Image (cartoon, grey):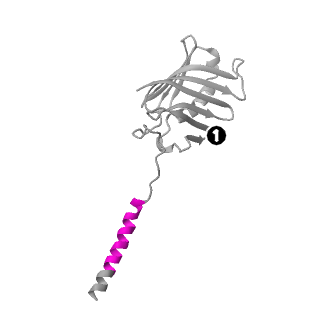
């Protein structure tokens, strides 16, 4: 009788151990973080980025143009996001500054037409901010995101896992951003 009780006990113990240990054997979901980005929380690390930007307006014209191209500098920090648009002559066209703690966004420019379009520029900034501050945990394996009517796609990742191209699309505009250089 002791042999039967012992065998039953061992059988029960084995089943219990298999139940407890089996989840560890199952394949865990693969990280979709680009290679080199595993240690970061967000897709874009804090730093200074030099960018080339193309904006295509689908339903509007600004200063007679549907498409605008410019260079820019992005300074992404824990406390602030600063975007500076630079003319082909190297002069500052505008600065957009967000206080990340308060969410306050300010536009600084001496260009009258941009002053008049301040609310529209701030609307363009919304998906840019989303693209810049995306947590790595929300990056899908397809490297794209759909949020609030915007379609954001990331392309051409560098060895640090930073996307060198980002495309933001909506019904009203497309914004294409290419990173020329990055410094922490």
At horizontal 63% and vertical 15% (from top left) the residue drawn is 112
Q: Position of residue 46 (x, y in %)?
A: 43, 30
Is 8 on the left or on the right of 30, as rendered? Answer: left
Say which quarter of the image contains residue 14.
Answer: bottom left
**Percent x, y for residue 137?**
47, 44
Q: Nearer the viewer, residue 119 or 16?
A: 16
Residue 20 inside the magenta-drawn segment:
yes
- Which residue is drawn at the image coordinates 59% and 32% (left, top)? 167
- Residue 90 is situated, as x and y percent measured from the top left of the image, at 54, 12
Residue 29 lies, with reference to residue 50, above or below; the image says: below
Report how many numbered discs are placed on residues in the image: 1
> Is residue 126 among what the camera can see?
no
Q: Which residues are magenta?
A: 8-25
Residue 59 vertical position relative to residue 71 in the rendered view, above or below:
below
Residue 161 lies in the magenta-colored region:
no
Which quarter of the picture shows residue 1?
bottom left
Quick one: which residue is furthest to the bottom in this view?
A: 1
Few, some or many residues within 10 Å of mark 1 (<14, 14–19, 20+):
few
* Residue at the image point whose x is 52% and y is 28% from the top: 105
The quarter of the picture where the C terminus appears is top left
Q: Which residue is mark 1?
A: 149
View extreme (left): residue: 2
Specify the principal SS of the magenta part: helix
Kindly tell me whether residue 7 is visible in this rendering.
yes
Residue drawn at 69 percent across, 17 percent down: 63
The local secondary structure at tag 1 comes to loop
The percent position of residue 75, horizontal first and vertical second, equals 46, 25
Q: Is residue 9 above or below residue 84?
A: below
């Amino acid at each position: 009788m002791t042999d039967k009780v012992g065998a039953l006990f061992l059988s029960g113990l084995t089943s219990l151990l298999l139940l407890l240990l089996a989840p560890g054997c199952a394949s865990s979901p693969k990280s979709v973080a680009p290679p080199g980005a595993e240690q970061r929380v967000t897709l874009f690390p804090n730093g200074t980025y030099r960018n080339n930007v193309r904006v295509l307006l689908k339903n509007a014209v600004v200063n007679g143009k549907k498409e605008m191209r410019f260079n820019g500098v992005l300074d992404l920090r824990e406390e602030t996001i600063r975007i500076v648009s630079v003319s082909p002559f190297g002069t500052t066209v505008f600065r957009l500054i967000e206080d990340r703690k308060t969410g306050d966004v300010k536009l600084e420019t001496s260009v009258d037409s941009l002053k008049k379009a301040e609310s529209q520029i701030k609307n363009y900034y919304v998906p840019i901010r989303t693209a810049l501050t995306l947590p790595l945990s929300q990056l899908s394996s397809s490297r794209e995101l759909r949020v609030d009517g915007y379609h954001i796609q990331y392309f051409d990742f560098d060895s640090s896992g930073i996307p060198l191209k980002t495309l933001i699309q909506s019904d009203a505009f497309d914004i294409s951003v290419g990173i020329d250089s990055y410094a922490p």
